[in-house]
Image (cartoon, rainbow, N blue to C red):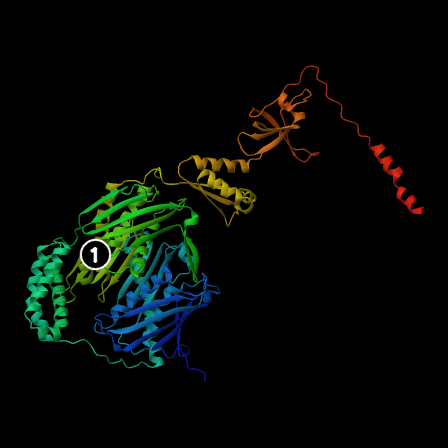
């Protein structure tokens, strides 16, 4: 039986199309689509259990995988199969998760699994840009309680023109790389990196992407209607009690408001709020708490959130006593760790990050091996968030998705300021030591100072800030919060992080939790973020104004040298013998790469101090040394022979040539030692390759004056005729013997 398929086509406006098809694959899933653009095809399936899970949150799992077979490649590793997701796949999962999660009902607790897999790869299509579209389209075909269709799109700007879902080649020329997630009505998520653009330019890019997303959302709705829109499933929602909610609200609101208004630290505030909650619980009997104790906790949390939000909207005050645009106290320190190549500590309020910098060769670059992209990163940042930084004890289970996402954001914020001619591979590691909001932005600030401390010649220093928003659609009031606390992150309507220089924005990550946020509020928030960002930047530059002129004494210096392609083999030696011995003798690291364009050898020499590097450079000079015919060179005797002396060029040690005994002096020389001895230094003239011996010829006597009355020895006569006659006379001897 041939399955009946349904499809919709989205025109991207420049000859490219995206098609969404269903009905052919994975029909037992609750919703499945194949999204295709060019040769790129991805399958998305969604499944949700009909039974509610015993949790108080949405157990949503988004899994995005790129299959190596899609690009006609084998996975690396011994087992030759896809195992744990790469950082690139994790980042795509986060992009999709952040847009989907808010659109499920708050009381829907059934496990939901969204699986997106790349089945066919096209070099001209970046698949992550279509992952959000695929996920939403599959959900539209299901019976899940989901608010509305959404989509995601990448926007770039090439030669001043915005482009939707640019190719990787276009992206390389673009000054913007942003992913926008939105419904037909509202923008919900923004993430990306930019080349120091203005706040207005960023808003224009978001608007452009939103128009394209509206078209993609409409296509999903049409597909669902053609396929047959399913009835939304019934599910058992959370228990509600309006009277209890009002009772808890009345008991909690004023007390919470008073504590919030007083301004206090995270620990003090947390203990005070816990006491209020326990006091309210104490008014109920054990039987009542057993019956609806979870409701009391839930309604208390709602009352606490309402009180804190109203305090900010009505009085412009915040939990720690700050005004809405005020930044927490900042202190910084550089060169904190004595053995690292660069280090810094950045503390803002109760958030602290310790950053280190390590300098290396191209061999230390971060290898990216994905079906959709292969390459290297010469600048990368790792972010660690240990449990103690929030005063918790919990199991360590490897790098979390959150750590990957926050590290990537900080990396994108900084990498544009690393100059292209930086010879090093640079690794930044941020250890979050305290956290109460905005640890990723603290990482950016600490990373900037550590890079400057290490002597990396940054184009401009970068700072970052996390902003929040509290709004009331009924009254029209809103408050933009600078440098948000962890608590303000949870209770606010928007969380957006912005990094940038004094010139403009370099990266951003924005999650908008309210519908229909106006672009006016967005631009105002970005302007306030700029003021805060510049304030933080001044604190960084007060600590370290300029990058260090050079690397630290114990840090390696990098020298790069280009050599002709034909000399690469000689420098490496048979089986790598020459280069390995050189590294051992000089205590350096030597890496040789080939320029793909010129085919020249690019030699990277990394070593502490100049002695070892100088020795390697001398070896290369020696290797490349080519004496010119007719030129005079200073040489040193390194070996004595019966028939001459072996000398090496002083300007190219290791380059040896034989000085024949006949070229030592004008007078006849019986013993070489009569004229020169071991270690003697003198000048010789270079004559090139001798036609007779086919060896290089140098002469000492050629630059010495001829003695008076000197007579050249006549050339030796060659008696060729006799030799020829001898051969001629004897040529028939063998034949005569045979006759006998």
Residue 417: image x %, image y %? 34, 47
Farthest-out residue, bottom:
1
Please report the residue visible at 66 percent of the width from the left and 27 percent of the height from the top.
642
Residue 355: image x %, image y %? 29, 48
Asked if residue 406 lies left or right of residue 366, the reply is left
What residue is pinned by disc 1?
Answer: 390
Residue 157: image x %, image y %? 37, 57
Farthest-out residue, front:
740
Could you say which is closer to the camera, residue 162 or residue 105? Answer: 105
User: Can residue 627 be seen in this snapshot?
Assistant: no
- Residue 343 vs 402, above or below: the answer is above
User: Can residue 28 be seen in this snapshot?
Assistant: yes
Could you say which is closer to the camera, residue 426 or residue 598? Answer: 426
- Total numbered labels: 1
Please report the residue visible at 71 percent of the width from the left and 15 percent of the height from the top.
709
Please report the residue visible at 68 percent of the width from the left and 36 percent of the height from the top.
694
Quadrant into which the N terminus falls: bottom left
Asked if residue 714 lies left or right of residue 570, the reply is right
- Residue 499 vs 553, above or below: the answer is below
- Residue 411 vs 241, above or below: the answer is above
- For mark 1, give the secondary structure: helix
């Amino acid at each position: 039986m041939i399955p009946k398929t349904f499809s919709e086509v989205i025109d991207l406006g420049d000859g490219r199309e995206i098609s969404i098809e269903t009905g052919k694959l994975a029909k037992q899933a609750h919703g499945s689509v194949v999204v295709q653009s060019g040769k790129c095809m991805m399958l998305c399936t969604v499944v949700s259990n009909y039974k509610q899970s015993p949790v108080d949150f949405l157990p949503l799992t988004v899994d995005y995988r790129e299959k190596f077979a899609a690009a006609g490649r084998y996975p690396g590793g011994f087992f030759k199969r896809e195992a744990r997701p790469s950082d690139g796949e994790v980042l795509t999962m986060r992009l999709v998760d952040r847009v989907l999660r808010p659109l499920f009902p708050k009381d829907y607790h059934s496990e939901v699994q969204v699986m997106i897999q790349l089945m066919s790869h096209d070099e001209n299509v970046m698949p992550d840009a279509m992952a959000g579209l695929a996920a939403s389209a599959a959900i539209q075909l299901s019976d899940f309680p989901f608010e509305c269709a959404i989509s995601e799109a990448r926007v770039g700007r090439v030669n001043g023109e915005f482009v939707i879902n640019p190719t990787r080649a276009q992206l390389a020329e673009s000054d913007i790389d942003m992913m926008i997630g939105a419904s037909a009505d509202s923008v919900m998520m923004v993430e990306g990196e930019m080349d120091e653009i203005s706040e207005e330019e960023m808003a224009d890019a978001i608007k452009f992407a939103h128009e394209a997303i509206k078209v993609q959302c409409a296509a999903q709705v049409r597909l669902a209607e053609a396929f047959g829109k399913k009835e939304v499933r019934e599910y058992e929602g959370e228990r509600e009690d309006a009277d209890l909610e009002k009772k808890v609200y009345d008991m909690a609101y004023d007390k919470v408001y008073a504590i919030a208004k007083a301004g206090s630290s995270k620990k003090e505030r947390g203990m005070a709020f816990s006491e209020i909650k326990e006091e309210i619980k104490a008014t109920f009997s054990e039987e009542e708490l057993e019956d609806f104790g979870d409701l009391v906790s839930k309604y208390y949390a709602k009352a606490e959130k309402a009180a804190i939000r109203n305090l900010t909207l009505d009085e412009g005050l915040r939990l720690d006593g700050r005004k809405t645009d005020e930044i927490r106290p900042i202190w910084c320190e550089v060169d904190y760790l004595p053995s690292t190549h660069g280090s810094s500590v950045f503390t803002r309020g109760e958030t602290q990050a310790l950053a280190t910098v390590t300098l290396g060769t191209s061999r230390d670059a971060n290898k990216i091996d994905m079906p959709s992209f292969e390459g290297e990163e010469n600048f990368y940042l790792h972010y660690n968030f240990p449990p103690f930084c929030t005063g918790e004890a919990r199991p360590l289970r490897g790098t979390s998705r959150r750590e990957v996402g926050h590290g990537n954001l900080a990396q994108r914020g900084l990498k544009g300021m690393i100059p292209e001619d930086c010879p090093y591979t640079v690794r930044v590691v941020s250890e979050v030591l305290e956290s109460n909001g905005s640890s990723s932005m603290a990482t950016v600030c600490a990373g900037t100072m550590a890079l400057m401390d290490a002597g990396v010649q940054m184009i401009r220093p970068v700072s970052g800030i996390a902003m929040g928003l509290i709004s009331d659609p009924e009254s029209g009031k809103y408050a933009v919060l600078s440098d948000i606390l962890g608590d303000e992150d949870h209770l606010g309507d928007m969380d957006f992080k912005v990094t940038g220089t004094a010139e403009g924005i370099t990266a951003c990550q924005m999650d908008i939790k309210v519908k229909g946020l106006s672009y006016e509020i967005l631009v105002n928030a970005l302007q306030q973020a700029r003021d805060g960002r510049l304030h933080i930047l001044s604190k960084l530059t007060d600590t370290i104004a300029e990058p260090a002129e050079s690397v630290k004494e114990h840090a390696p210096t990098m020298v790069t040298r280009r050599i002709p392609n034909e000399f690469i083999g000689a420098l490496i030696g048979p089986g790598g013998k020459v280069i390995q011995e050189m590294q051992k003798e000089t205590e350096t690291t030597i890496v040789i790469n080939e320029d793909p364009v010129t085919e020249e050898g690019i030699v990277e020499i990394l070593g502490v101090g100049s002695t070892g590097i100088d020795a390697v450079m001398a070896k290369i000079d020696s290797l490349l040394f080519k004496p010119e015919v007719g030129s005079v060179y200073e040489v040193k005797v390194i070996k004595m022979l019966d028939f001459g002396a072996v000398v090496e060029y002083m300007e190219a040690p290791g380059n040896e040539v034989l000085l024949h005994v006949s070229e030592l002096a004008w007078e006849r020389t019986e013993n070489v030692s009569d004229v020169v001895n071991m270690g003697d230094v003198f000048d010789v003239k270079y004559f090139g390759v001798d036609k007779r011996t086919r060896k290089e010829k140098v002469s000492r006597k050629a630059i010495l004056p001829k003695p008076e009355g000197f007579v050249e020895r006549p050339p030796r006569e060659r008696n060729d005729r006799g030799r020829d006659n001898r051969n001629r006379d004897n040529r028939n001897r063998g034949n005569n013997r045979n006759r006998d």
